[in-house]
Image (tube, coloured by chain):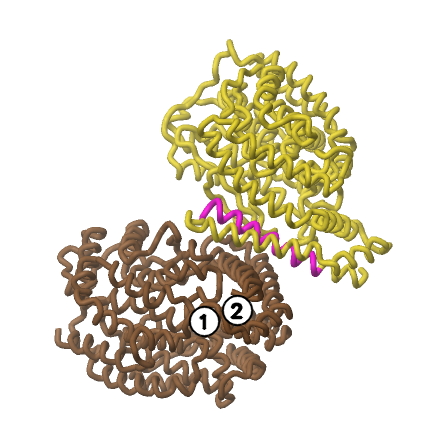
Chain colours: A yellow, B brown
Amino acid sequence: MPKPYQQLLERLRQIQCLNGTMALLSWDQEVTMPPGGARDRAAHRAALAGVIHEKLVDPELAALLATLAEAVDLDAAARANVRLTQQAHARAVRLPAALVRDQAQTASLAHGEWVQARAEDDWLGFAPFLDRLVDLKRQEAAALAIGDEPYDALLDSFETGARTADLLPLFAHLRVSLTELLGRCPVRGRVPAPRPAGIFPNDRQHELCRRVLTAIGYDFARGRLDISAHPFTETMGLGDVRVTTRYQSDNPLSGLYAVLHEGGHALYEQGLPADLRDLPAGQPASLGIHESQSQLWENFVGRSRAFCEWLAPLLRELFPAAYEGFAAADFYRAVNERTHTPIRIEADEVAYNLHIILRFEIERALIGGDLQAADVPVLWREKARAYLGLDVRDDRTGALQDIHWCTGGFGYFPTYALGNLYAAMFWETAQRDLVDLDDQLAAGQTDALRQWLRERIHERGAVLTAGELCREVTGRELDAAPFVAYLQQKYGELVRI
Amino acid sequence: MPKPYQQLLERLRQIQCLNGTMALLSWDQEVTMPPGGARDRAAHRAALAGVIHEKLVDPELAALLATLAEAVDLDAAARANVRLTQQAHARAVRLPAALVRDQAQTASLAHGEWVQARAEDDWLGFAPFLDRLVDLKRQEAAALAIGDEPYDALLDSFETGARTADLLPLFAHLRVSLTELLGRCPVRGRVPAPRPAGIFPNDRQHELCRRVLTAIGYDFARGRLDISAHPFTETMGLGDVRVTTRYQSDNPLSGLYAVLHEGGHALYEQGLPADLRDLPAGQPASLGIHESQSQLWENFVGRSRAFCEWLAPLLRELFPAAYEGFAAADFYRAVNERTHTPIRIEADEVAYNLHIILRFEIERALIGGDLQAADVPVLWREKARAYLGLDVRDDRTGALQDIHWCTGGFGYFPTYALGNLYAAMFWETAQRDLVDLDDQLAAGQTDALRQWLRERIHERGAVLTAGELCREVTGRELDAAPFVAYLQQKYGELVRI
């Protein structure tokens, strides 16, 4: 490898170490920080973000990148490091420091306003702050100048290379198919699945989550499980990938499926290529691919009939009174029950992506300048009725339910849907490659599946783009059909039970 | 304030935020980090240390300092910020990066060797690494060029402004007086203090420590109490000062006094001046002053007859079986029992500083080039016999017992002794100012004492040097007499009990 490339590597490792440090600042903030630490923490994060920004915009880095752009003797991983750094550098250079500062301050302010507006169901109190955030994000999009419409630049910051024009046909396919499937799986008129009653102590739920994380192959020597208000996964480095969950005292499934979801994220992070440690090419390929791993373990594995055969006895062992006489079939029905809820994070697998499409359409209109914040609730209600058959009664359970917009996260929602589509394609391929996968999962054996994911996806890091990775693993372009087929088969059967 | 000073403040706040971030990396490493995270953590610390170093040696910082050195319109706090930054800048500039790297690598290597040598009682296995560390520290001393002898430069890095020539008379006074006092308080022939037996569960010990920390005024909203292998205090910022302890299942006093010690450190950090937040002048005055605060709460308060009257019923409440019939007088005797141990951290108040003086004399000889590592054990045994009347049987309980040297911490030990001397002087003054202090402590009331410390010491930050602060608070120069008098009175009484 040429000398400029060695110099680039040194800089990239330093930047990645600072990113890993930032991750610890985040993890600690949600898990261990005392309340009085909030002010210091904000200052620490801002200082470290400033240093990382300095490193990214450094003209010497730009000079190295320019030299390496013409190098012909780089392998695929090296080319990926150059490409990814070029993208990060361009983004950092194009964003004016004043805009970044203004966004951070406005988001911080808007977050407080959102908390209050949600508590008081006061959309119009929040709307002016949303308009201001939208305006700043439009400025960001203009500065970045990526893609064909302003929304593209924001989308690209979460899912590099993704474009609105590519999402539209995928989402149209999803919207039509899922709406149709919803109509065939009504919530009303069904016998509800059995629901165990009782109090589920935290220590038993923790034991359940530890057992399940161990079963899916999460490496506790390189991580830990804690409690936080909202479950998340945080990566300090290849040797330190932590997950969190939360426990509801009357329902162990909430914490359990949160841990399967976060465990999927964590398996990806723990399986990244060691030889590209601390380098951009050794990081996850995209948020969409990341989400495919969490969805795959939470839903495709965790809510499968096979894995429920392993989970049901575990719940009977840990909560004998509550789960006495609870068969695997009961458990399978319970964790796949259709919901009829305006809340995205409580939605079942069929409804979930319709919640996402609704948000995508609204945020695209906001960023495109076609919609004012004050008009969001009316549109929200219309779409909830049309796509989900839901009457949204208040904004607290409507447009005020998600934290994303008030933190400036426009363009994030589509990655959830992309994750589902990728997951279905990977799952379809894995099922073809691993002929007795169901038998293995029914016995709680996940080694073959994890190894399959590791070799084909985790260990590839970000050497390939998300789209290239999808083609390499599945032989096909990203497509909604496998996801729709998966749901049609699963819910077709469930309706007949 | 002039504009260059405002620019300096901005830089200093950024540096302090990076220091606070480094503190979190340390705290997490000892308390929450999974074992697999060690490699990443070392890299993260190195990267962040590199950034802090870059900021300290920045020529623009040097230019600001040069401008401000001639400014006449600065107040005392501003002058302190300039002076302290000038010291840190000079230190960073003078230390060659190659030396710092070599020291870090050698210390890392030597730490592993020390762990093994201690386990195998193999001084000669460790000696070559110690010689190498000493050689590097001599290089550091030469580069820093502070004081009259090489040891001065190292001492100065832990206790700014302290010089060997000033320590010598203080330590001579201590050595003579404490050796004499030891002779009058023999361990043998005394009736041992009553010792409660039983198992002391962690959760009850934790409750004890929480109650005691709360009683001395530790603010849990700006901190937390955790378990680690070695108790310590870590400060992320004024709003986040954390303490740790450890619990021995057969002895609650170990964890309790560790928490009183760390609590003393933490009260200092939590009481620093808010208007100098994130600035050098708003940090602790010196390690010696810091140690005075921990020793004051652990020994002068925690082992006082008065506070034992409050502690004894608390132990009876939390451990009723073990402490049944245990009077305050029994407790007072138990926590002040003379020890006869070669281990520094198990030594009583009389013996402790003789352990320190022994180490000071040996490390000064090493750094002065007058002693080879191989010859340390012979000298150690001679001094242990002469000062402490102890026969040191092996190096595991002799020269291999402390971690300090193998991490390169030459010059640190004297700060423990300075802490005791400062504590005694502050205590003497506080007792004069607060006439019913004993009655208050016997009732577990610490507000007046804490307020006294806060106003006179904590809230002064580092605006004054340690020596200036001592003069301001006590009206006198640093002196060993108050400490000796305190011990003579206390142990004189204890011998008669």
Residue A281 appearing in the image = no
Q: Is residue B388 left or right of residue A233?
A: left
| Residue A250 drawn in magenta | no
Rendered position, B24 above or below B372: above
Secondary-structure class at tag 1: loop
Q: Is residue A153 left or right of residue B201?
A: right
B68 or B472, which is in the foreground?
B68
Q: Residue at x 50, y 59 (%)?
A: B20
Disc marking residue B102: none
Chain on which label 1 sits? B
Q: Which residue sits furthest top?
A: A189
Mark 2, residue position? B112
* Residue B383 location, quadrant: bottom left
What is the x, y in percent for residue B163? 44, 83
Q: Residue at x 49, y 70 (%)?
A: B74
Secondary-structure class at tag 2: helix
- Bounds of the magenta segment: A10-32
For the C terminus of chain B, the image quarter is bottom left
Mark 1, residue position? B403
* Mark 2 or 1, closer to the camera: 1
| Chain-order first, disc 2 or disc 1 | 2
Q: Which residue sits furthest bottom?
A: B370
- Give the alpha-carbon distance from disc 2 to disc 1, as whole Å: 11 Å
Q: Is residue A390 left or right of residue B340?
A: right
Residue A174 appearing in the image = yes
Q: Amino acid at mark 1?
A: Ile
Q: Main secondary structure of the magenta part?
A: helix
Task: Tell me whether marks 2 and 1 sit on the same chain.
Answer: yes
* Residue A302 location, quadrant: top right
Q: Residues within 10 Å of mark 1 (few under 14, many from 20)?
A: few
Rendered position, B224 above or below A489: below
